[in-house]
Image (cartoon, rainbow, N blue to C red):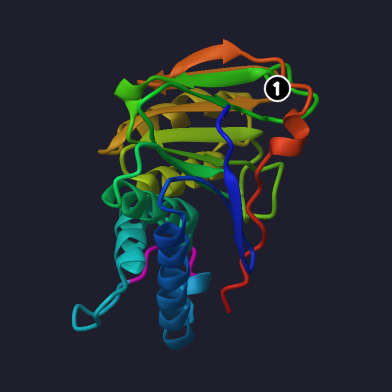
Amino acid sequence: MNRHLREFHYKEAHFHILTSAWEPVTESILAERHRLEAFISTYPFFASALEPVKIPSTIRLPESVRRMVEASFVTGLGPMAAVAGTLAQMAAEISAGQGSPETIVENGGDLFLDCREEVILGLYPGRNSPFSHLALRLLPDFMPLGICTSSGRMGHSLSFGDCDIVTVFSKNASLADAAATLGCNSIRSRDDMEPVLNRLLEIPGIEGALAIRDRYFGAVGSIPELIKTEDPEITGKISYDDASDFQ
């Protein structure tokens, strides 16, 4: 990405944000995080569940929880699989609502973008990967768009797979986040890549997905143009999501 993104940190969450509405956006992130934390303090099972959880309809849910629960039931994963993408999109929606002409919110490798000019977004499957110089060229027609990535080999998030990266594209970043985790959990060999990617594409709301494992690359659906980028500072721009501290 060629724009200058400002950093915003809260506990284990590390955001990179482009917006003309910095204060409303960062305040919204803190407010929603506090609502989510308060919910988890009352219902601690929500943070540790590895499959969808049923919450009584009489309970009034924070918006982030509602979106995470929806993504959870679609993908079959625990709701926390969607937390980063959810908070990224909610912050981006505040930015757009405040009239920001450009919005990028990146949260631990999960993004929501809404820009009027193209954005170049690097992919990083690992230093030794033959695909380490791949990037995505996102034209305005693709945006607004959620782009979420999961890895079974990098970062601290729980993964049951063995895949460099799975990246999912959707207008719904909660869904993209959970689906990326589902894809990464499901790929343990090169033979898994095609059926898993096709499975992701069958999920309503998923526009496209790609996967990289060792020297193998696969993609399905509608994805941005792939280009080659030479960035000597790429390793300093990599975003990981830290281990969750939701207790």
Let me know if residue 50 is in the magenta part: yes
Q: Residue at x 44, y 83 (%)?
A: 38
- Residue 58 in percent (x, y) is at 19, 83
Quadrant of res 245: bottom right
Tell me: 171 left or right of 35. left
Residues drawn in magenta: 49-53
Q: Residue at x 27, y 38 (%)?
A: 205
Q: Amino acid at mark 1?
A: Ser
Above or below for 87 versus 139: below
- Residue 151 in percent (x, y) is at 62, 41
User: What residue sits right under mark 1 in the picture?
Assistant: 132
Name the quadrant of the N terminus. top right
- Residue 180 in percent (x, y) is at 48, 41
Quadrant of res 79: bottom left
Name the quadrant of the C terminus. bottom right
Let me know if residue 118 is in the magenta part: no
In front: 91, or 158? 91
Q: Residue at x 57, y 24 (%)?
A: 191
Q: Residue at x 43, y 87 (%)?
A: 42
Could you tell me which secondary element the residue under label 1 belongs to? loop
Most common secondary structure along the magenta stretch: loop
In front: 106, or 102? 102
Above or below for 137 versus 21: above
- Residue 49 in percent (x, y) is at 48, 69
Residue count near mark 1 (Cα–Cα under 10 Å), binned few <14, some 14–19, many ≥20 = some
Tell me: 53 left or right of 148. left
